[in-house]
Amino acid sequence: MKAWQVQELGDPGDVLQQIELDAPDPGAGQVQVQVRSAALNFPDVLMCQGLYQVRPDLPFTPGVELCGEVTALGEGVERVQVGDRLMGASAIPAGGFAEFALMPATNFKAPESLDDDAAAVLMIAYQTAWAALYRRAELKPGETVLVQSAAGGVGSAAVQLAKIGGNTVIAIVGGAEKAAAAKALGADVVIDRTTEDVVARVKEATGGKGADVIFDPVGGDAYDLLTKCVAFEGRIVLVGFAGGRIQAPPLNHALIKNYSILGLHWGYYNVKRPAVIVEGNEFLTSLADAGRITPLISRRLSFGELPDGLEQLAAGKTIGRLVWHPNP
């Protein structure tokens, strides 16, 4: 089979190599799938660089999220059958950027209401947004939600899910094209951080109160700015550090303004409380079946375009989600 493989660590455009491999055999509790569509995620970039919390031995095939058709079953697999269409996480080192990949059999069947591309991007971004807003922040109808990087993959999911909950959404983006995308997603207020004063605009939009819930997948300097935008007794949910710097916030500021700083490591629920993942999937599948969420997919990549796509993602130049196809 054709696959992309990381043989040494570095930026994706430098270290991804196109090679021929045997299709991987599923281990206990795993299934082999023919990849229909694979999503590009920031963890794929970090994994190539050796900066992700999961550090597979070299060489490995990245691609942490995909939709695939089951072609073989590993030992002990009963709930999944050959021919099923699964969506969700891959089993690195046999990731989704190949013609065949491995997936844990605990992944979910893709809803018939979603095509392969939409199914490939439903799991990580939407589950993260759902868990951040509704589990960690306990978002209530009528509250104001501020979404950082609102035209990105997880940010666009957060905008949609907050609007579904009946909330006012303030979207922060970088550039006119991303502002248009956030508006199309349903954001009530869109702030272009490259041309506007974010703090002043948030205060204007909230009557000086600030946002009740802040969704931050960026961290770093962006987080420092958001602490000036949070309401009294508001909640800031940290879901990632795409900005590159892990901030050390002055906790006296949180004390003075009575706001909470909440962390979300969504993948850890698989270990500690897998029932939460099941609950999120049921909720999101019901929304997809009802046509209430439509993943924002801005680019579909051919086999050879993968390194460029990951470089664009790393540089923050993408809108919504990018998906990759192993075949034309």
Image (spheres, helix red, strand yellow):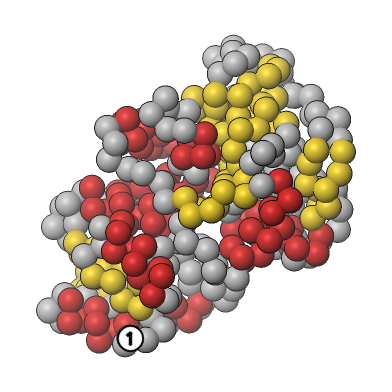
**Residue at 41% in and 70% down:** 177
Residue 201, horizontal then vertical, whole percent:
24, 82
**Residue at 47% in and 50% down:** 297
225, above or below 30, in the image: below
- Can residue 165 be seen in the rendering of this structure? yes
- Can residue 270 be seen in the rendering of this structure? no
180, above or below 294, in the image: below
The one of 211 and 112 positioned closer to us in this rendering:
112
The one of 228 and 44 positioned closer to us in this rendering:
44
Name the quadrant of the C terminus: top right
**Residue at 57% in and 49% down:** 300
Residue ranking furthest to the front: 328
Residue 59, horizontal then vertical, whole percent:
85, 48
Residue 240, horizontal then vertical, whole percent:
51, 62
Residue 247, horizontal then vertical, whole percent:
51, 76
Q: Tag 1's secondary structure?
A: loop
Tell me if mark 1 has few (under 14), some (14-19) or many (20+) residues whose alpha carbon lies within 10 angstroms of its own: few
Residue position marked by numbered label 1 in the rendering? 196
Question: Quarter-wise, where is residue 27 in the image?
Answer: top right
169, above or below 301, in the image: below
Name the quadrant of the N terminus: top right
Residue 65 horizontal side relative to residue 170, left or right: right
**Residue at 33% in and 63% down:** 182
Question: Quarter-wise, where is residue 50 in the image?
Answer: bottom right
Specify the amino acid type for callout 1.
Answer: Glu
Residue 11 horizontal side relative to residue 312, left or right: right
